[in-house]
Image (tube, helix red, strand yellow):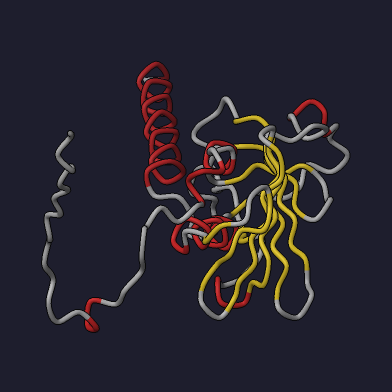
Amino acid sequence: MENKQTKLLTVMAAVLVIMVVVIRFIDPPEDAPQGLLPVVTTGLVEVQPDEVARITLITPEGTLLAENSEGGWLIATPTQARGDDTALEDLVRLMNGLQAEPPLVGADPGRYGLSDPAATLILTTREGLEHRLEAGIDSPMGVKGYVRFNGGDVQVSSTQPRASLARPFEVYVDRRVVSVASSAVSVLSWCHQTTTRAAGP
């Protein structure tokens, strides 16, 4: 009789343990954390192309300086030329859309390629505000990179801006021979010009 009671108590204890496991892991309380919390990223700055008066891009190639005029972007350095509006405004959009994780307070910038950045992008607004983005090495974990914004601490960015900022300066020069609005063109024709050589003696 006593042996049967011991077996019954053992079975009841086992059922109780199973119920606790089911309640705890299959149907967790509402306030229990649901797995690992995602890393919070925030935008570094909100700035639009029409708010920017000057773009400065520093890479191993040198320094590119472009100014926003009424007729579009003009490159002043390293050569004077009409700028490619789309390519230059993409630099503004890159900084505007860049998100980063919270700063790595006290981290050594040199370990992340930020003592001598691969590229530095400086946007100067029409109000005179300056936004400075330095791009270091790419992160080995995912498609991310190490950046520093306005001289602050190292941060992990949501993308790898280094490659985009280190493109050759020639991509920012407008290669069009002439710029004419299509609505202003009514007739387009090609003329073949021939040259005649004077007959020799």
Give the image quarter of residue 13.
top left
Foreground of the two, 77 or 112: 77
Foreground of the two, 24 or 115: 115
Residue at 55%, 46% (x, y): give it. 158
Residue at 15%, 46% (x, y): give it. 196
Q: Is residue 197 above or below residue 174?
A: above
Residue at 43%, 37% (x, y): give it. 21
Judged left or right of residue 130, residue 145 is: left
Q: Report the residue that reaches farthest toward the front.
A: 201
Judged left or right of residue 123, residue 4 is: left
If the image is split into quadrants, where does the C terminus sit?
top left
Q: Report the residue that reaches farthest toward the right.
A: 106
Count of picture labels: 0
Residue at 17%, 42% (x, y): give it. 197
Foreground of the two, 137 or 24: 137
Give the image quarter of residue 52.
bottom right
Q: Report the residue that reaches farthest toward the top.
A: 3
Q: Is residue 28 above or below residue 124?
A: above
If the image is split into quadrants, where does the N terminus sit?
top left
Where's residue 29, x and y in %? 48, 55
Where's residue 20, x and y in %? 45, 40
Where's residue 190, x and y in %? 12, 61
Where's residue 98, x and y in %? 57, 55
Q: Is residue 131 above or below residue 62?
A: below
Give the image quarter of residue 144.
top right
